[in-house]
Amino acid sequence: MLWNALTLQLGYNATLVTIGATLLGIAAGVTGTFLYLRKRALVSDAISHATLPGVGIAFMLMVLLGGDGRALPGLLIGAAVSSWIGLLCVSWLTGRTRLSEDAAIGAVLSVFFGFGIVLLTVIQTMGAGRAAGLESFLLGATAGMLFNDALVIALGGALTLVAVLILRRPMALLAFDPEYAAARGINVGRMDLAIMALALAVTVIGLKIVGLILIVAMLIIPPVTARFWTDRTDHMVMISGLCGGLAAWAGAAISAVAPAMPTGPIIVLVSFGLFVASLFLAPNRGVLAAYLRHVRFQRRVHMRQGLLALAQGQPIYEAYTVRLLNRAGLAQADGVPTEAGRARAAKALRDEKRWELVRADQAFESAAALYDGLRDIETVLTGDQIAEIDQRIGGPQGVAS
Amino acid sequence: MSLELAANMGAAPKAEIPSDSPLAIRGMTVSYGQKPVVFSVDMTVAEGSMTAIIGPNGAGKSTLLKAALGIVQPLAGQALVYGKSLKAARHRIAYVPQRASVDWDFPTRVIDVVLMGLYRELGLLRRIRPHHIEKARACLERVGMTDFADRQIGQLSGGQQQRVFLARALAQEADLYLLDEPFAGVDAATEKAIIDVLKSLRSEGKTVVAVHHDLTTVRSYFDRVFLINTRKMAEGTVDDAFTSDNLNQTYGGRLATGQIDQLELTAG
């Protein structure tokens, strides 16, 4: 059953909903990357909560005009207008008063959301039957979604995606170096507003599927996940889009199979799963990789210190060092060096002398910059250079015993 | 409006400036809040020169550059670039911001930063082609950073970061280079590399303006100075304007006499 949903074999409507959700997820991941890089991710939370009064007012207007209050395009336009007002409020409060952005976000978010809830309650008492369904904008629901609704979402997601691709260069430039971007003639204020407008588009389009409370997760979690895997902006955008699309696709499929489940929370949970997996497993930036790197580094330090101690005939106090040397066949369990250990120790001491010379000589400046006390000197200098240094040091250095 | 303002302030118009000066600033006033940081400043940059902007901390050196570039909005005044408005001639300027102004953990590689210099050439949609990469690499070569092209920028030392910023400016192939404290917190090798590049730019006929902190190197690095402490204090060749009198006025006694003596100044 779930397999059928994932492979889009659950009927026309469910298929379109899944495609729409996936497009939305990709658009959210890609847009969210720029929000994250510009360090404005939380503004999207204010934007999303500010949609609610618009939904309520649009519903009332449409009913008053004798139409169907639940027409999705009308509701989305209402949502867009009120969240745009919310966004302008945040910008105004931050720019013109002494309020910091986080305080402005908190104020706008709660006031707009509170107002929206009041409107929804009024609507409920106004005509309970027809209002049913507006609460689904809080947490999202794909069950019983109309064909046209899904079409609106899919189209909106695709258009947002195109807009992000067009603006990707100025947005990345602005996020990395706003002063340089301004010097190149990019209007910083307007470009910031464009980033926010794209986030707003994703939010409004995602209202029906994910709901306004959790849409912020679709904008934030994928880029954070992607950051673990890459050090390049373009790759990060793609990976983030992929994560967002994957989560939305799986989430929509799951909720197609189990219509009672809220779609938004499921998408967020899938997204979170990808995040946790990346947190632990990603190469370089992942927790596991960082731990292994640390252990390996510690082992190198202990080996080096142990060898130098052996070379100078000093006792080794750390049990871990002895164990490492013993395991490598360089020392016996009591810390007495083996034949191989003696040779390696002599080389370690000699390398130390070579490094000393390299670091004292201006001619080796670039090589000396790589000195960390652990690096083998052969990885930095050529055989000829080492021979030259050895000549300066003089005869071979024996192992003190 | 700015010219009248300057005149009203008593800064009588000086000798006519050649209208094609790389950068001509007139009556520039910038304030953060109610306190002017730069007040009614005129500056004329000579073509093909290397000019140091000098002054104590908080004297408005960086702000003057930023206002000239439109990065901060001036309260009054304007800047002409090669006799044209900033908007019309912006592409002839390459700006090197202070290193501390960006987040170095940003997910981008050295080569990507240099490619940002080709922003105008690439536009919104053009693909990055091999010849773009080649150009970026050539700029890295000039600052001695070729080996670092694929590194994440956060892995670089301060000096290396500064060189990458300079390479990005070189990629623009501009005529006027504005640098904000290019030597702040860099190692000796980088300082040498940067000044070599700047001098070679000058010998190509380009114009260089740098906010500069280290008074001891002014004489060997630059041929013109611009002294500022909110107001313009002096402007001219190093021989004419880099005098102990001017320095004393600019720094208002913040420099010890001993320090000034060491600068081998021409007698005021």
Image (cartoon, coloured by chain):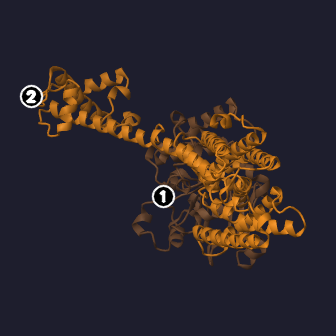
Q: Nearer the viewer, residue A173 or A28?
A: A28
Report which quarter residue A66 is drawn in. Answer: bottom right
The residue lying furthest to the right in this view is: A66
Along the horizontal axis of the image, is A182 left or right of B189?
A: right
Provide the chain ID for the residue under circle 1: B
Chain in brown in the render: B
Residue denoted by label 1? B214
Chain of the residue under the numbered disc 2 shown in the image: A
| In the depicted structure, whether residue A184 falls above or below residue A348 | below
Left or right of B207? Residue A153 is right
Q: Image quadrant for the N terminus of chain A?
A: top right
The location of residue A88, given as percent across then percent down, is 72, 67
Q: Amino acid at mark 1?
A: Asp
In the rendered image, the quadrant that contains the C terminus of chain A is top left
Numbered disc 1: secondary structure: loop
Q: Which mark is residue A15?
A: none
Residue B177 visible within the image: no
Tell me where residue A332 appears, x and y as whole percent. Answer: 13, 26
Tags 1 and 2 in contact by the CB under 8 Å rule?
Answer: no
Which class describes the residues within 10 Å of circle 2: few (<14), some (14-19), or many (20+)?
Answer: few
Chain that the image shows in orange: A
Disc on res. A401:
2
